[in-house]
Amino acid sequence: MMGISHSCRAFLHKNGQVMIRVRWNNRKCEVGFSVGCNADLEKWDNENQRVRYNTTHKVGGKVYVARDINNRISQFLECIEESFTEYGVHSQIPTTKELKELVNEKLGRIEKEIVVVGSIEREKSFREIFNDFLEVCSIERSWSESVHHKYVQVWNQLNSCDPDISLVILDENKMTELKKCYVKNGYRNRTTVKQFRILKSFLRWIAANGYLVGQGVLNCKVNLTVTKKKLLF
């Protein structure tokens, strides 16, 4: 495996677009990504490369909140890191085109299509479904920053257990593998049970919105002993 030295910087373009610049291969290669939203220059934090927390951005007739903008930046950076890791495993330095395509694929920007007799239907990636869940529920349920972070954290843990995870292969056995990953990484039983509860909340939303969830997934039990906390008076 080869470590590919690279740098990423989130910045605000003069037209208000939130951008991420990536450089690698001794700065011979460079590519820029637009995260798909705008921000107010006065509310941008150059040092942290994020918009300031709890701010609202009205740009070009559209309104964006800090949480959504910062979450998009984090997702882009995560996908960029994953892409460099994949190329590093094969000891290969990606071209600008290759990196851009792989990052966009991980973000669900490259649409996958399945051919059905007489028509073409679009099949969303698991990540894209998760993004829909975050967008819809954060508004409908008025999530705080911490609640939003908990779901993103569980999503990252699921992908850490299996980088190729998809809704198709997520079954009861895969849930068992995830439990083993938590145990292997030293998570307490109470934390593991809580993380499974958060994951199932997302999966129930998926099922309620017409997606097929693997048999036994929602009924899968963690079966870990959790000691009740003692109350001291």
Image: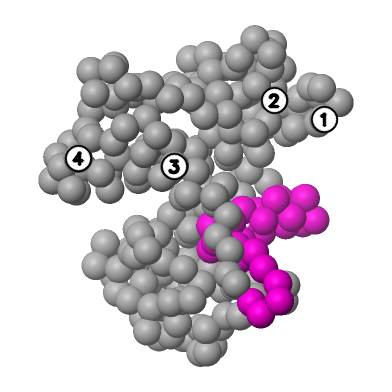
Residue type pointed to by label 4? Gln
Mark 2 secondary-structure assignment: strand
Q: Determine contact: label 3, label 4, CB under 8 Å.
A: no
Q: Is residue 198 visible?
A: no
Label 1 vs 4, first from the N-terminus:
1
The label shown at residue 48 is none
Q: Amino acid at mark 2?
A: Asn
Residue found at x 53% / y 14%? 46
Label 1 secondary element: strand
Q: Nearer the viewer, residue 32 or 157?
A: 32
Give the residues in magenta.
116-143
Label 3 vs label 2, nearer the camera: 3
Tell me the element at label 3.
helix
- Residue 31 visible to an observer of this rendering: yes
Locate residue 22: give its quadrant. top left
> As rendered, which of 168 and 74 lies closer to the eye?
168
Asked whether disc 2 touches disc 1, contact meaning CB atoms under 8 Å apart, the reply is yes
**Quick one: which residue is furthest to the right in this view?**
61
Please identify the quadrant where the C terminus is shown. Answer: bottom right
According to the picture, the residue beneath numbered tag 3 turns out to be: 101
Q: Which residue is mark 1?
A: 62
**Residue depicted at 81% across the width and 31% down the height:** 63
